[in-house]
């Protein structure tokens, strides 16, 4: 007996099979609720926000102030005035600021409208004037046991480019840029091919090495050969970019465990030629769009929980100015576990000394410099950080060089241990000099000057051993034909 099936029946059957296939391939529904709540507001608008513990907060956006630089009119600081349960406070948006306690809740402002106004992309999904995130009083910013620091490296081991910070390390700051690339995600600088990248959360690998699971075309996933995307139980997508190498165990469809090694930090893909981990999170935002879930507070909290530092110095973000301009060098975002910072001691690139959390300084020479701050808590514990200042000459044509140093390993160092140092100059032919700060002679090396951003041997490499325990401020510099200097520092602690 022969059965005949009409074309319409076959088409219906095929459509049904396709529907079942799509249903099977769809991303899983979230099974975990984060402790934060987000709301997007216009100036003058108020909202009632139900927090993760069931309590309710009344929040209103009162004012917004955005400060731009004189170079490319990039937003360098955005502040919002908010009222939370009747208590008013000014919050600075991102740029290394952590949530504040006010009105019986914790609150931060990850993004304001100005960052989208002169940017080439909408990374945040913001359709109002500002986004506010709220947590119950005393609640963790991200749930303990669900998130770890994504690198086997010391905090601020080298340069960073974090949320709302315009590009810098690869020499990307340009005075004539019509569109500004702001780092909505977190760029952790590191030593190429030597720093382990680990999974920040448990999750499903949905994309790796240009391969993506079916059903993820409408998600934030954008496959690339050097990129891994992981989907966690919150429904958040984690992007890890610029891998030097990705471990074979990390394949689309496999699951990673929190803390599992994923590969080695590198400068592949659209890295600009500087070695770093580009780490970011995308989630559904109040607008209904996919947008950045600002991760600085999560990384900070996980690092503090895992490594228990006594004090952390913070002198970031970097600055971009004209010759003759005055800026404020500010380390007031520094932190001590005891809650008490006793001293801020600055050593400036011209050899002068300053004290205090912040002060104004005018720069009269073009170049890229690095100002040192030493922060000491009430028990004598210390930490160092560096304020990077790029100064552009009046002609705005011959832009001074930039420089990126790194070292590995960065933690638990012992006297006599061999440490690898790498450096690369940008915007100029290489030629760098190291001063390791221990009285040993300077060491000259030559990088490729970023002639080919993805060149395997682009960074100049040397090694060094410190004979004694102590804190060493390592200096590396490059001087171009016009006499403009690119200067950077690293803090090396030998136990």
Image (spheres, rainbow, N blue to C red):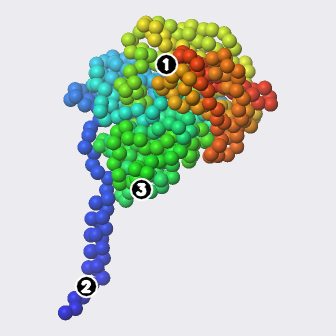
Seen at 27% across and 45% down, the residue is 30
Q: Do the numbered discs 1 and 3 sit on residues whose CB atoms are within 8 Å?
A: no
The foreground one among 42 and 385 is 385
Q: Farthest residue toward the right?
A: 481
Q: Residues within 10 Å of mark 2 (few under 14, many from 20)?
A: few
Rendered location of residue 376, percent (x, y)? 48, 10
Rendered location of residue 111, percent (x, y)? 45, 32
Mark earlier in primary sequence (1, 3):
3
Q: Secondary structure at mark 1?
A: loop
Circle 1 or circle 3, nearest the eye: 1
The residue singled out by tag 2 in the image is 5
C-alpha span from label 1 to label 3: 44 Å
- Residue 58 visible in the picture: no
The residue singled out by tag 1 in the image is 495
The foreground one among 281 and 109 is 281
Q: Residues within 10 Å of mark 1 (few under 14, many from 20)?
A: few
Q: Do the numbered discs 2 and 1 sit on residues whose CB atoms are within 8 Å?
A: no
C-alpha span from label 2 to label 1: 79 Å
Seen at 49% across and 42% down, the residue is 264
Rendered location of residue 408, percent (x, y)? 54, 31
Quadrant where the image shows the N terminus: bottom left
Q: Is residue 485 left or right of residue 135?
A: right
Q: Secondary structure at mark 3?
A: strand
Please tell me how many numbered marks the rendered image carries: 3
- Residue 51 visible in the picture: yes
């Amino acid at each position: 007996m022969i059965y005949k099936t009409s074309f319409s029946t076959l088409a219906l059957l095929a459509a049904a099979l396709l529907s079942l296939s799509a249903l099977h391939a769809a991303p899983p529904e979230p099974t975990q609720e984060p402790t934060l709540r987000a709301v997007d507001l216009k100036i003058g608008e108020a909202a009632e926000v139900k927090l993760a513990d069931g309590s309710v907060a009344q929040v209103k956006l009162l004012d917004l102030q955005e400060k731009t630089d004189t170079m490319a009119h990039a937003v360098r600081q955005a502040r919002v005035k908010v009222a939370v349960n009747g208590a008013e406070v000014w919050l600075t948006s991102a740029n290394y600021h952590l949530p504040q306690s006010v009105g019986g809740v914790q609150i931060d402002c990850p993004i304001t409208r100005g960052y989208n106004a002169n940017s080439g992309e909408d990374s945040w999904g913001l359709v109002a004037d500002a986004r506010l995130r709220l947590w119950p009083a005393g609640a963790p910013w991200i749930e303990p046991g669900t998130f770890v620091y994504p690198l086997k490296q010391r905090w601020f081991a080298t340069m960073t480019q974090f949320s709302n910070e315009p590009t810098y390390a690869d020499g990307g700051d340009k005075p004539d840029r019509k569109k500004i690339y702001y780092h909505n995600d977190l760029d952790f600088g590191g030593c190429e091919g030597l720093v382990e990248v680990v999974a920040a959360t448990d999750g499903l690998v949905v994309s790796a090495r240009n391969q993506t699971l079916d059903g993820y075309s409408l998600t934030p996933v954008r496959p690339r050969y050097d990129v891994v995307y992981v989907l966690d139980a919150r429904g958040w997508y984690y992007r890890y970019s610029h891998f030097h190498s990705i471990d074979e165990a990390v394949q689309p469809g496999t699951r990673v465990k929190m803390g599992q090694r994923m590969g080695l930090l590198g400068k592949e893909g659209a890295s600009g030629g500087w070695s770093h981990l580009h780490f970011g999170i995308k989630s559904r935002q109040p607008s209904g769009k996919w947008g950045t879930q600002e991760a600085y507070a999560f990384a900070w909290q996980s690092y503090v929980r895992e490594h228990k530092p006594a004090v952390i110095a913070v002198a970031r973000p970097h600055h971009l100015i004209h010759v003759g301009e005055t800026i404020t060098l500010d380390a007031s975002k520094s932190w001590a576990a005891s809650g008490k910072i006793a001293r801020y001691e600055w050593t400036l690139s011209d050899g002068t000394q300053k004290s205090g959390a912040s002060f104004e300084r005018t720069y009269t020479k073009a170049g890229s410099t690095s100002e040192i701050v030493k922060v000491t808590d009430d028990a004598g514990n210390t930490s160092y950080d560096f304020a990077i200042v790029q100064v552009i000459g009046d002609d705005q044509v011959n832009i001074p060089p930039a420089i990126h140093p790194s070292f590995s390993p960065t933690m638990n160092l012992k006297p006599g241990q061999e440490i690898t140092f790498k450096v690369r100059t940008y915007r100029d032919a290489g030629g760098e000099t190291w001063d390791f700060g221990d009285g040993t002679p300077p060491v000259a090396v030559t990088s490729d000057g970023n002639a080919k951003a993805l060149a395997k041997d682009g960074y100049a490499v040397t090694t060094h051993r410190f004979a004694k325990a102590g804190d060493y401020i390592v200096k590396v510099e490059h001087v171009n034909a016009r006499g403009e200097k690119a200067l950077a520092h690293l803090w090396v602690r030998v136990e």
